[in-house]
Amino acid sequence: MFRWLNSAGSVFKDPLPGSTNYLSAYDSQGRLIRVKEAKRARDATERMDEENRSKESAGEPEIDGGRGNGREPKLNYHTVDAIPRETEEDMVPFPGNKQFQSQAVLSEDLKEVIWHLVIQKGMSVRRVSASYLIDMRRVAAVVRLKEVEKQWEREGKRLATPYNRAVLAMLPQTPFRNPPQPHESINDLPVHKTTVQQLFHPVAESRHFTRVDAGQAFEKGLLPADQRIQHPEIVAIEKARLSGRVAEDFINAEWEKAEAGDAARRAAVTLNKQRKDDTTTTIFSGRWEFKFEDVKVDKASVGRHVPGIGLRYGVPAQDRKKGQVKIPTRVG
């Protein structure tokens, strides 16, 4: 171990600034692999240019090494000191697990910009998410944590800033840029819990069965896939752009409709929580809270229906059980 610390491991005593400095980024001699590859590519380009110059002086046709016809070579690093950007191979923190790659986190500058836009400028979380290509849940979490940080600063509490800076230095980051650098996919389709089971739904051949009908077959009121994504307004705006009828009023109307839907959902969550609190009796006992709720025995009996105890405590579904009738036995 001490032999490694005094040879290849010595590079980790003074970490390279602006790099994750994972073990997989270095070879057994402690040399940065991407710098070696950059030097090898530069030497190959210079060797090709030297051969072209020697053959040109001898009257032989020139070999196009990437510089002919005014083109630049694909790999052209001016100096080895200019360290190339990290690749996917450099994002592997555990050398024994090549499948795991460290994902980028938001930089402090980008977090500050998100907090400024949402809190001080009043921009909605939805618009910030679409503008900076960050998941809406992540944007909301950044705003909440930034508010806690600002509150602690006002109260004079000490922050673990050196620790935070040291941790961020070991992780790849998404910086604040204009235009923004994409951080993650923001329109992935969430898997609804009612769609994970097998379902046989008889449909007449003459019927036009759409995604809306598929959602209703799984659960009444379940929206289709293109409406359950986080940003359906982006899809609507893109469709309008492709049809050649995009206008500023149309874009603003789509954003206002989406934000109105967010406000309605927040109001519904607040109302449901208020109703739940009104029907629940809470007794505080030191560090514990005991909650009592009046229920009907018929609804809370053992069973697989929604209010039943069996569903609450994980009775398995019957869609893949052997011997169960899985095809419809009647047409309603």
Image (cartoon, helix red, strand yellow):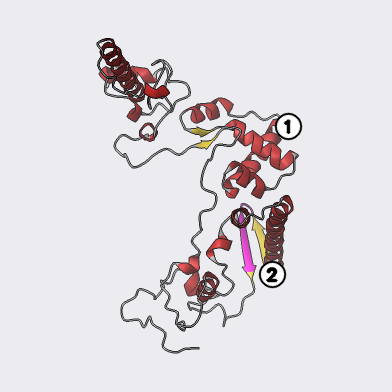
Instruction: From the top left corner, tell me how far across and down residue 100 is, in percent.
Output: 36, 41
Q: Is residue 204 above or below residue 225?
A: below
Instruction: From the top left corner, tell me how far across and down residue 120 is, in percent.
Output: 75, 39
User: Seen in the image, is 57 located left or right of residue 247?
Assistant: left
Closest to the camera, between mark 1 and mark 2, is 1
Q: Name the kind of residue labelled 1 in the image.
A: Arg
Instruction: From the top left corner, tell me how far across and down residue 244 is, in percent.
Output: 63, 54
The one of 276 and 12 positioned closer to us in this rendering: 12
Taking the spot 53% from the left edge, 63% from the top edge, the residue there is 225
User: Seen in the image, is 75 located left or right of residue 59?
Assistant: right
Density class for disc 1 (Cα within 10 Å; few <14, some 14-19, many ≥20) is few
Q: Which mark is residue 1?
A: none
**Residue 291 in magenta stretch:** yes
Q: Is residue 74 above or below residue 288?
A: above
Quadrant containing the N terminus is top left
Taking the spot 39% from the left edge, 32% from the top edge, the residue there is 87
The one of 2 and 253 positioned closer to us in this rendering: 253
Q: Are marks 1 and 2 in contact (CB under 8 Å)?
A: no
Q: Is residue 37 above or below residue 190?
A: above
Task: Specify start and end residues of the magenta stretch as a single range.
Answer: 286-292
Secondary structure, magenta segment, majority class: strand
| Residue 100 seen from this side | yes
Which secondary structure lies at badge 2?
loop
**Residue 125 in magenta stretch:** no
Looking at the image, is mark 1 or mark 2 earlier in the sequence? 1
Taking the spot 50% from the left edge, 88% from the top edge, the residue there is 332
Between the residue at mark 1 and the residue at mark 2, the CA separation in whole angstroms equals: 38 Å
Q: Name the kind of residue labelled 2 in the image.
A: Thr
For disc 2, the marked residue is: 279
User: Seen in the image, is 86 located left or right of residue 222?
Assistant: left
